[in-house]
Amino acid sequence: MWRSVPRAGGFCLLGLEQPYANAQTTVQAGWDAQNLYLGITCYENRMAELRAAAHGKDSAAYADDAIEVFLGPWTDRLKDYFQFVANTGDGAYDGKGLEAQWNGEWQHAAKKQGDRWTIEIAIPSARSASTRPCAVRSGDGTSRAIASPVAAAMP
């Protein structure tokens, strides 16, 4: 599926003078009537050190090496976004704004291979998607975040 989908890359570290992140991330996005699909590749030179302590749904996957996806309109209201987090194992977290108890019906799968790890995500009920993703890597090297101005209708 991903071979014909353009990749967004060349991401930088927010708040640092360094122009590009040392460990790059690429993102591919597609959608159909049912789902928004994300294919995320995280290049890594420290694969043996990846952390995936959180397991299962509603776990603290955001504390591990993980992908965080924020979807919603760009507004100043914190309630208007959805957060999806998947670590390099089977850990996952989701929330709506500051409502951590919100549970979305989404799927994810992680895979480690050589010098990279990948996560594929399917999020139901996506209405539209942008091709302007932004990825950042936290200062401690444990998380990457991807934000995109996507209007989404979630149950």
Image (tube, rainbow, N blue to C red):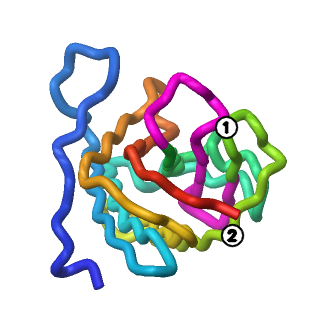
- Tell me which label, 1 or 2, sits earlier in the chain: 1
Query: Which residue sits at x=33%, y=71%?
Result: 30
The stretch drawn in magenta includes residue 36 = no
Query: Which residue sits at x=72%, y=53%?
Result: 54
The stretch drawn in magenta includes residue 77 = yes
Residue 105 is left or right of residue 10, and the answer is right
Q: Please state, as top left, top right, bottom left or bottom right, where the C terminus lies in the image.
A: bottom right
Q: Which residues are magenta?
A: 73-93
Query: Residue 64 location in percent, x, y?
Result: 60, 45
Task: Give the camera-side residue of 78 and 94.
Answer: 78
Query: Residue 135 location in percent, x, y?
Result: 34, 41
Query: Residue 40 location in percent, x, y?
Result: 36, 61
Q: Amino acid at mark 1?
A: Gly
Q: Which mark is residue 97?
A: 1
Q: Is residue 96 above or below residue 38?
A: above
Task: Give the camera-side residue of 102 and 155.
Answer: 155
Residue named by callout 2: 105
Q: Quadrant of residue 77?
A: top right
Query: Residue 1 location in percent, x, y?
Result: 29, 85
